[in-house]
Amino acid sequence: MLAIDTNVLVRLLARDDAAQALAADQAIAKGAWVSHLVLAEAIWVLDTVYERTPKQMIAALDLLLIHETLVLQDADVVEVALGQFRTKPALGFSDCLVLAIARKAGHTPLATFDKALAKLAGAQKL
C-alpha cells in the first residue's frame, strides 16, 4: 500500500492548491497509509500555518478516521488521542498522540515537564 507524506495529507485536508489536491486525490484513490508522524505533522501544519481552530482540527481527524481509502497507523491509538484532544484541546493533538502511543506500547508513565499533560492518566510530571 502506498504511504503518503505530510505535504500530501495537508493538500488533502487544506484543498488550497487545486492541482496538488487533485494529484493527492488520485494518489490515494486505491488506498494509502498515514503514519503517526505524518498525521501529527499535518495537524501541526493546520494549526500553525493555516491557523485552524481545535474544532476544525478535530473535524479533520474525524474525517480521516472514517476515510474510505486512507488507513491510519494504529487507528485505535489515534481515536484515543483524538478523544483526549477533544476534551483538552489546549494540550495539542501531538501530546495526546504521544501519550496514547506510549500507553499502547505499555511504556507508562510518560515523563513530561508539561503540567497540563501530566494531569492525564498515564503521564507523570518530572
Image (tube, grey):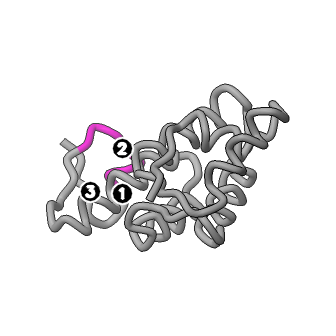
Q: Amino acid at mark 1?
A: Lys
Residue 46: image quadrant is top right
Question: Which quadrant is home to the N terminus?
Answer: bottom left
Residue 79 seen in this snapshot: yes
| Tag in front: 1 or 3 | 3
Query: Which residue is identified by label 2?
Result: 115
Which of 112 and 11 lies nearest the eye of the viewer? 11
Can residue 100 be found in the magenta stretch? no
Quick one: SS at disc 1? loop
* Label 1 Cα neighbours within 10 Å, binned few <14 / some 14-19 / many ≥20: few
Which of 57 and 27 lies nearest the eye of the viewer? 27
Look at 47% across and 57% down and name the residue there: 33
Query: Which residue is identified by label 1?
Result: 119
Q: How many marks?
A: 3
Q: Are marks 1 and 3 in contact (CB under 8 Å)?
A: yes
Q: Is residue 99 above or below residue 76?
A: above
* Label 3 Cα neighbours within 10 Å, binned few <14 / some 14-19 / many ≥20: many
Q: Which residues are magenta?
A: 112-119
Q: Which mark is residue 123?
A: 3
Quick one: SS at disc 3? strand
Which of 35 and 119 lies nearest the eye of the viewer? 35
Quick one: SS at disc 2? helix
